[in-house]
């Protein structure tokens, strides 16, 4: 679910202090975007929302969530909004976030 090699690589590139800031910013921004999906997004906004989420997720190693966002973004580009399962995307984020936070402290200590 999480690409820990990507997380480790990012942490090494930006340092521990900046990494913690990036994680906090990522979670804050993505939580907000996910809440917008939960509240309901117009078809015309889905593509942009999923594009943002996909890119954010890739940067922090949320592999499965990012892939679902990419699939949804492609469907939205083609106008196939009925093929986008926003509930699945939201559940994937929720599971990824739980897994990420549960293991992050252990990995930061390493």
Image: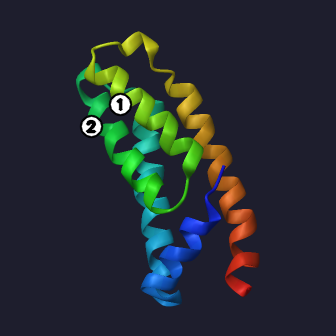
Please count the marks in the image. Answer: 2
Residue 94, placed above or below residue 87? below
**Residue picked out by circle 1:** 73
Residue 97 in picture, x, y percent from top left: 63, 54
The residue sitting at 28% across, 14% down in the picture is: 79
Q: Picture quarter containing residue 28?
A: bottom left
The residue sitting at 49% across, 60% down in the picture is: 27
Classify mark 2: residues with Cα within 10 Å, few (<14), some (14-19) or many (20+).
Answer: some
The residue sitting at 27% across, 37% down in the picture is: 48
Q: Considering the image in quadrants, where does the C terminus appear?
A: bottom right
The residue sitting at 54% across, 43% down in the picture is: 65
**Which of the pair 12/86 is nearer the observer?**
12
Tell me which label, 1 or 2, sits earlier in the chain.
Answer: 2
Label 1: element kind: helix
**Residue picked out by circle 2:** 48
**Which of the pair 103/24 is nearer the observer?**
103
């Amino acid at each position: 679910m999480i690409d820990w090699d990507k997380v480790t690589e990012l942490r090494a590139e930006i340092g521990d202090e900046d990494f913690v800031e990036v994680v906090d910013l990522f979670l804050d921004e993505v939580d907000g975007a996910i809440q917008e999906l939960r509240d309901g997004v117009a078809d015309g906004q889905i593509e942009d929302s999923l594009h943002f989420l996909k890119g954010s997720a890739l940067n922090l190693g949320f592999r499965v969530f990012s892939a679902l966002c990419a699939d949804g973004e492609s469907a939205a580009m083609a106008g196939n909004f009925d093929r986008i399962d926003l509930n699945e995307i939201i559940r994937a984020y929720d599971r990824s976030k739980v897994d990420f936070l549960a293991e992050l402290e252990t990995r930061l200590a390493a």
